[in-house]
């Protein structure tokens, strides 16, 4: 019985010690001004694995590609959408997202589309503020006979400025 009592005291003590250790270790990697790149107003966004494939369950939306490019005044986001057959409507909804230091927020948007085509290619230009990280979010769509299929894509992030 004394072993059970000892164990019932040891487990909560061990758990408390473990939680305190994790809390201290977690705080050790908190963002500091040293983590910022010269000219940046926030720390960089986390590196994300963007292995995006078009949904294999799609019937006709077969490929989607997006990219972002820095310009002298902002960011250009490009998007390509491909269908396996002529679509009544095919295109891309473009969103510019800015990194706040903790989350991505949408700051601007635009759309482009074609009718009676099996592909769409478009580029939209957006203003951007120096010192912030930006990325593109694109929603590719194709509508055939009233049924719309979509695919969401994200670009890499770029620092505006420098």
Image (cartoon, rainbow, N blue to C red):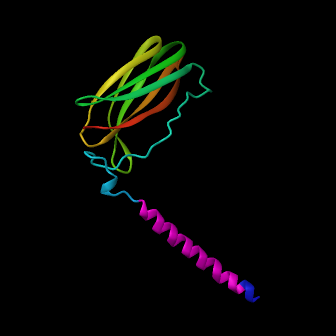
Residue 2 drawn above or below residue 128: below
Judge whether residue 24 is colored magenta: yes
Query: Would residue 153 be found to the left or right of residue 128 on screen?
Result: right
Across and down, in percent, residue 143 comes to 50, 19
Taking 10 as reference, is 37 above or below it?
above
To which quarter of the image does residue 109 belong? top left
Task: Residue at 51% x, 70% y: name it.
Answer: 21
The location of residue 161, given as percent across then percent down, is: 25, 37
Where 90 falls versus 104 (above or below)?
above
Magenta part of the chain = 5-29
Q: Residue at x 48, y 14 (%)?
A: 88
Rendered location of residue 159, percent (x, y): 31, 39
Which SS does the magenta portion mostly show?
A: helix
- Write the residue at 39% across / 46% down: 45
Looking at the rendered image, the quarter that the C terminus falls into is top left
The verdict on residue 101 being magenta is no
Q: Residue at x 31, y 50 (%)?
A: 36
């Amino acid at each position: 019985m004394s072993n059970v009592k000892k164990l019932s005291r040891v487990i909560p003590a061990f758990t408390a010690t473990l939680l305190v250790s994790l809390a201290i270790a977690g705080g050790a990697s908190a963002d500091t001004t040293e983590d910022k790149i010269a000219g940046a107003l926030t720390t960089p966004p986390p590196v994300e694995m963007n292995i995006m494939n078009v949904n294999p369950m799609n019937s006709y939306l077969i490929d989607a590609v997006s990219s972002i490019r820095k310009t002298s005044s902002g960011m250009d986001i490009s998007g390509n959408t491909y269908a396996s057959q002529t679509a009544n409507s095919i295109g891309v909804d473009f969103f510019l997202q800015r990194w706040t230091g903790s989350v991505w927020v949408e700051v601007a948007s635009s759309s482009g589309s074609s009718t009676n085509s099996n592909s769409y290619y478009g580029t939209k230009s957006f203003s951007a503020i120096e010192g912030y990280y930006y990325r593109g979010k694109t929603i590719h769509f194709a509508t055939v006979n009233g049924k719309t299929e979509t695919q969401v894509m994200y670009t890499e992030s770029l620092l505006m400025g420098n």
